[in-house]
Amino acid sequence: MASVMLTGGAGYIGSHTAVELIESGHQVVIVDNFSNSSPVVLERLQQIVGAGIVCERGDIRNADFLTEVFQRHRVDAVIHFAALKAVGESCEQPLNYFENNISGTITLLQVMQQQRVNGLVFSSSATVYGQPESCPIREDAALGITNPYGRTKLVMEQLINDICTAHPQFKAAILRYFNPVGAHVSGLIGEDPGGIPNNLMPFICQVAVGTRPQLNVFGNDYPTPDGTGVRDYIHVVDLARAHVAALDYLLREGQNITVNLGTGCGVSVLELVQAFEQASGRSVPVNIAPRRPGDIAECYADPALANRLLGWQAEYDVKRMCVDAWRWQSQNPEGFEPSR
Ligand code: NAD
Ligand code: UFG
């Protein structure tokens, strides 16, 4: 069993992955600066797994801090979640995104090399496909950029691939997530965006719980069956389990991989709203609004490569995603901390 550093491990996907890793017998060291998460998540993780959580508070851009963490703890591999991720914000503050995401990754890779840690699982995104030519999207589809956040993901993928080429002992699994939603079945951890949510599911949850009056649907004139945007929503627990499978694959096979993590099913905005209303018993009023700049009509994965290489496939359907998202939201109407 491995000892794994999770950068950004207190965040939405990292915290769910910590649970799945620990429940699979791995040890976890969370490294987070809490710039987009709450320390309360550590107490919640402890409640779920029934054991103390190792966490080092600090910034991945600080090489001295990272070096100390590697020296204090055994680390066999790193799962690198830490990043800023808001597309709109990245358009307003591109330098912050380049600095945090790209410089942070370079520092992490340098310290990993110094410490001779040679396994990396990296959080990439379907955003690297830009405006896809067709769906479902395979990993060999053309890549493109539609915003600075997406640029950071593409650059980081390229940096990691260059390092794999230069140092064959260094192995990486690049995971391109589609749209993670849902929450742990306990309702103790889930997605907690500060301020107004950018993404669809947390916005729907806040409308259902009464924090916001209605959902703006960004466009109903796309060339999709009901005119609204189509995405590949994947339950965060399925996604977390894919990280365990990717880590096991890296340690077992020692092969570099880049894989899509999605269900392969396209779901429209209105379909998700309807599924959520059924799951929660709450109504989610919608207002048809103009298209959001930069949005694409549809985006869903061909997950066959991950299915084949990792022996993994998404198990939870949209209904389950909504049930679990609603349990988290209704038990924690203001997220982890009312003030965030
Ligand atoms: P999140 O914001 O909930 O988690 C990221 C964590 O990283 C936060 O806890 C934050 O405090 C921490 N962090 C950020 N910069 C840091 C730094 N410099 N040093 C230390 N910690 C830092 O985001 P998430 O949804 O869990 O996403 C995790 C990863 O997955 C990110 O890399 C994101 O870009 C990627 N991703 C997310 C989605 C999505 O829709 N959630 C989709 C595709 C890819
Ligand atoms: N949408 C609305 N109203 C809202 C929010 C979203 O109608 O208030 C619509 C969007 O127009 C889109 C769909 O809901 O059609 C999904 O939007 P999200 O913002 O939830 O997700 P995106 O697919 O636009 O982007 C997300 C992340 C990106 C990531 C991408 C693929 O924000 O960083 O998934 O992983 F790159």
Image (cartoon, rainbow, N blue to C red):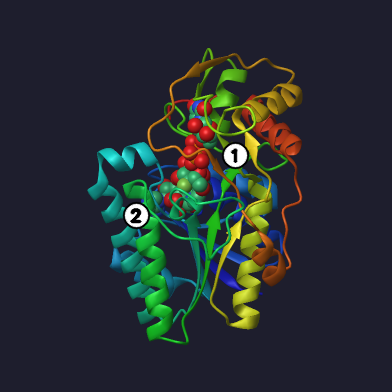
Q: CA distance from mark 2 to mark 1?
A: 27 Å
Residue pictured at 55% horizontal, 41% vertical? 298
Where is mark 2, residue-wise? 151
Residue 54, percent across and down? 53, 59
- Secondary structure category for the residue under label 1: loop
Front-lying residue, 334 or 240: 240
Q: Quadrant of the N terminus?
A: bottom right
Comparing labels 2 and 1, the label whose residue is closer to the camera: 2
Amino acid type shown at disc 2:
Arg
Q: Residues within 10 Å of mark 2 (few under 14, many from 20)?
A: many
User: Toward the viewer: 138 or 287?
Assistant: 138
Q: Tell whether 63 sits left or right of 21.
A: left
Label 1 crowd (10 A; few <14 / some 14-19 / many >=20): many
As helix, strand or loop, the secondary structure at mark 2 comes to helix
Task: Tell me which residue sits at (63%, 82%) in the image.
Answer: 253
Total numbered labels placed on residues in the image: 2
Q: Is residue 336 visible?
A: no
Going from N to C along the chain, the mark reached first, 2 or 1, is: 2
Corner quadrant of residue 159: bottom left
Residue under the image location 46 percent in, 81 percent down: 170
| Residue 90 drawn at (x, y percent) | 32, 43
Q: Residue at x 42, y 74 (%)?
A: 161
| Left or right: where 44 falls relative to 312 | left
Image coordinates for residue 185, horizontal then vertical, percent: 73, 41
Percent coordinates x, y for residue 94 in the rendering: 26, 46
Q: Quadrant of residue 88?
A: top left
65 with respect to 246 (left or right): left
Task: Write down the residue under mark 1.
Answer: 190
